[in-house]
Image (spheres, rainbow, N blue to C red):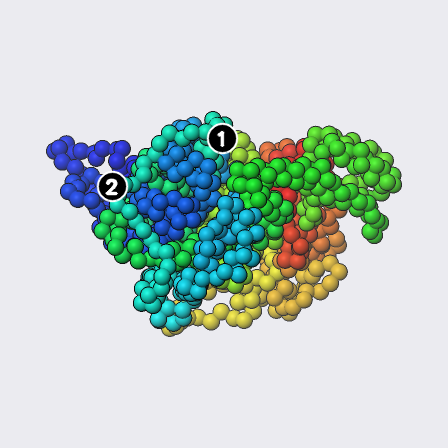
Amino acid sequence: MSACVPIRTDDDASRTPPRRSRLGRSPRSPRRPHSPPGSRPPGGRRFCFPVAGADLSASISVFLIALPLSLGIALATGAPLQAGLVAAAVGGIVVGRLGGAPLQVSGPAAGLTVVTADLIQRYGWRATCAITAVAGLAQLGLAALRVARSALAVSPAIVHGMLGGIGVTIALAQLHIVLGGSPQSSAVANVQGLPAQLADLHPAALSVSALTVAVLLLWPRIPGRTGELVRKLPAALAAVAGATVLATVAGLRLPRVDLPSWSSHALPEMPEGPVLGLIAAVLTITLVGSVESLLSAVAVDKLTAARKTPDVHIPRARLDRELAGQGAGNVVSGALGGLPVTGVAVRSTANVAVGAVSRNSTILHGLWVVVAALLLVPVLDLIPLAALAALVMVVGVQMVNITHVRSVKRNREALVYAATLTGVVLTGVLEGVAIGIAVAVIVALHRLTRTRITVEEQGGVHRVRVRGQLTFLAVPRLSRMLGQVPFGADCLVELDGSFMDHAAHEALHDWQTAHIAQGGTVEFTGRAGSRISEPASETHGCCRPWTPWRNHYCGSGAQAAAERESPTVHQLASGLSSFQRNTAPLVRDELARLAREGQRPSQLFLTCADSRLVTSMITASGPGDLFTVRNVGNLVPPPGEESGDDSVGAAIEYAVEVLKVDSITVCGHSGCGAMQALLSGTPDGEAGVQTPLQRWLRHGRPSLERLNGENRTWVRIAGRLPTDAVEQLCLTNVVQQLEHLRAHESVARRLAEGTLELHGMYFHVGEAQAYLLTDGEGGAGRQSSPGDDGEGEGLNSGAVFHRVDPAVSALPVSGAAMTSRSSPASRSPLVSRSSLISRFSRTTSRTTSRSSGAPRAAEGPHAPLEEFPVRATPPCEPTGPVNRPAP
């Protein structure tokens, strides 16, 4: 499989010389997996610039989007219009070649419009170019320090609020141009001047702007085949082109694009002004541009990973290299008299959507901008400025993203978002971000110190609910509320928080010790009912750790349907990744010990292959505890009847003779498909030929004959009769397979020696309830040995499956017994099995049976410690300061 083979990227190929054979020629060089069509092998000779067809078409689409947007952003900042084209060309060629995100498209972006406009008003255009170049040097320095990942630590609410505030400021400024006027110096001034502008409308500018906005909004919504055809032309280009045609045909007298000769293009000069102000200007461009570029690179990675076609491997973004590429782009753009450069989400999204397969599409789009700037000046001079203003105004409005607003509201960050947006609009970008950070810190401190603790009695159990983080500040209130629980009472402490410091943990531990010493009981749970010593699932919010391994979907609609189409690989890879990340570090030492000492399980566990039976979950066992054999119907073929399939007999012999297990358990379950097939009959196939499944099920016919025999004895569940014939046969089958076990020579010999015990077990899937087999007299559930009085009568005189009571914890299981082999004299397999199954009944069965109705499962790293009990810890005792994510 190609997914298991490391794939070299373009960068790796450029650094690694081709391997030579002894004849001096390069060995066979097949095309690398997932290489774009038309690309050449890494070791081959290249006489031209290799460009895939997909990159060529993508570059044209991105160019058609970038051209009007670059002119519009230059207009919005008050810079020369050529500056937008320079920045677009540099962003495509320089950043496209040097950056670390292959499919990200860089250029002038709306996110820096407000900052750049303010710098131009304060220092002039040529000084702003110098500031841009110095900001690029600062980005190169940050890339050298490898701090790109640190930019992702900024709260999304602050970033989205900053972009939303910039969008509002842009929209307010461009609205004046749309109406035929001129923008003011600030957002507040634009709002104050809006009534006067509305009273003095310019019909020509308003008509062109209205057409531009209408095309932008309606173009993506054209239905049918016509829509598919016209959408090949970007909406931005169609809107500007339509407005230009209208203004030209109607002869409207409007301000238009005026690109002066490139010979008079303004270049940078040294800025003059206070040093602190210049430093603040450089830092503003550096920080805003870097954060926007890096977040855009991460978003492009997600879009690329989710793309179905083309099936081409795209390397993930290297953020430090991307930051260096942005720095180099700003140095070149500033030196050539261009606007600041940053990663642009709109163009990058289009680049991914139209099928780009390498960075060549980005570079080519920059070349097309250069060609247009040199050869298409007469065409560009026809564009009305009102059309460009309307285009940028719509982009500004779209920066206030409704999806982002819902996300921050759902995560209780709406206050931070609103404060940042308002601060950017009223005071500026840098000041607004500072306000957002301050509000975020205040909100975090408030949540950390706010803890709600209540005590109430329900059904004789005192329930203490703790909402919020438990720190030393909450210890006095916590101690006071815990003191309201009467001595000797049963108490359930429900902790709903993500952090508990040492002071709070010690207070809880001391109170628990004193309360238990006075005859009470204490249990600690999370909000969804899981014990805090049992790490919860990191998967879906409504699921348990085992649900991803069955056909379970938390999503709905299109998302769930998409998951159902190919769930296997995704679930397996996700589960393996979760194990390596969370569980492997916890079990690695124990598995290393087992690898050194070899397996020494105490029990052979023979059960059905049904996917609903998770043996480690039902028995609360871990590595090295059970030697498990699974087959269809939990069948044990009698000796001599295997007919070429000795796998079960071989496993029994190996467990009994080599591993020297102390007991064997046969476990049946409700709703067994094999038993249903036996009851409905298993007719032969065509021409009397039996399928492998039909041949295997013949080993279950003795169970069916035992059920239908004249001298049958009913096998039952204590307290009730079997619900139907299938359950009756499932119970009878367990008894019958135990008899088949006794017929094996190695098992019979160990039974005669008194060193082996047989057990029967039944698991009701729908009830999540385990039952252990005892004889009709209510005995110990052990299969009598041949030397016992009344041989064979124990199970034939009315075997009974008894419900495992969660209170069987009186039969303790030590940690040593769980992880190391102990002598038969020191450990009873029946006691261990009963205790383990009882432990399941106390904990897992409760959450399993109600998982679909649970309001919400606690989130946190998934480490199934309950399935690997390496030490004996009372389940209600907190084992250390709790630090788990909030639900």
Residue at 38 percent of width and 44 percent of height:
79
- 481 vs 844, nearest the viewer: 481
* Residue topped by disc 2: 263
Q: Is residue 463 above or below residue 206?
A: above
Residue 362, horizontal then vertical, whole percent = 31, 47
Q: Is residue 668 visible?
A: yes
Residue at 47 percent of width and 26 percent of height:
275
Q: Is residue 67 above or below residue 83?
A: below
Circle 2: element type: helix
Q: What's the amino acid at mark 2?
A: Ser
Disc 2: CA contacts within 10 A as few (<14), some (14-19) or many (>=20): few
Q: Residue furthest right?
A: 486
Residue at 24 percent of width and 48 percent of height:
374
Q: Is residue 533 visible?
A: no
Q: Please say if the residues under marks 1 and 2 sit with CB atoms less than 8 Å apart.
A: no
Circle 1: element type: helix
Which dot, 1 or 2, sits closer to the camera? 2
Earlier in the chain: of badge 1 and badge 2, it is 2
Residue at 75 percent of width and 53 percent of height:
778
* Residue topped by disc 1: 277
Disc 1: CA contacts within 10 A as few (<14), some (14-19) or many (>=20): few
Picture quadrant of residue 54: bottom left
- 816 vs 778, nearest the viewer: 816
